[in-house]
Image: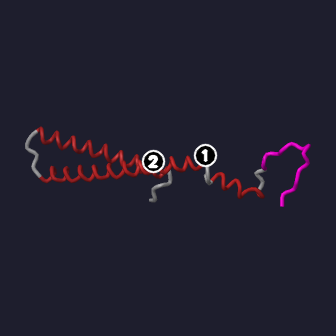
Amino acid sequence: MQTQRPPSQPRQPPSLSPSSRGVVEDVRGGIGAYPGQRKNEQLVIAVKDLESNLQRACQRKDELENHLRRVETTRIRSGAERAKKIALERELADVQKQVSDIRMKLRSLSALER
């Protein structure tokens, strides 16, 4: 039961004491039209984008590794073939760095388990 305040007293802002902790947790959880809900939705969208980027990068990495394996099993006869192999190795290193960066971003968002 709420106590009635006399009309002459100004209205006090709600306290954040332990007795009102349940209300504060509801606000922090982003329930309803609170800004926390929008933030959570943006986080979910960002995580989904990063996950799809990670999947594409991993597929590209696998393709490059397979192609490089095929090149390494054949004998390199010309400078052009050697240059192509070096280009593949560099691209593979770039894609591996990209995969690592995406995983680090996902971990920072606590969306990727080790």
- Quadrant location of the C terminus? bottom left
Q: Is residue 26 left or right of residue 83?
A: right
As drawn, the label of residue 98 is: none
Q: Quickly name the residue at label 1.
A: 35
- Residue 107 screen position, x and y as percent: 47, 52
Could you classify mark 1 by the number of other residues whose Cα lies within 10 Å: few (under 14), some (14-19), or many (20 or more)?
A: few
Could you classify mark 2 by the number of other residues whose Cα lies within 10 Å: few (under 14), some (14-19), or many (20 or more)?
A: some
Q: Amino acid at mark 2?
A: Lys
Q: Nearer the viewer, residue 82 or 24?
A: 24
- Residue 109 screen position, x and y as percent: 50, 50
Pick out the residue farthest to the left. Answer: 77
Q: Nearer the viewer, mark 2 or mark 1?
A: 1
- Residue 14 screen position, x and y as percent: 78, 49
Classified by dominant secondary structure, the portion drawn in magenta counts as loop
At x 12%, y 38%, the residue is 80
At x 19%, y 50%, the residue is 67
- Quadrant location of the N terminus? bottom right
Q: Is residue 65 left or right of residue 8?
A: left
Query: What separation in Å lies between label 2 and label 1 (alpha carbons)?
Result: 23 Å
- Residue 74 screen position, x and y as percent: 11, 51
Q: Quickly name the residue at label 2.
A: 105
Q: Amino acid at mark 1?
A: Pro
> Do the numbered discs 2 and 1 sit on residues whose CB atoms are within 8 Å?
no
Q: Is residue 62 above or below residue 80?
A: below
Q: Nearer the viewer, residue 8 or 109?
A: 8
At x 86%, y 42%, the residue is 10
Q: Quadrant of residue 22?
A: bottom right
Question: Colour scheme in the image?
Answer: secondary structure
Q: Which range is magenta?
A: 1-14
Circle 2: element type: helix
At x 50%, y 54%, the residue is 110
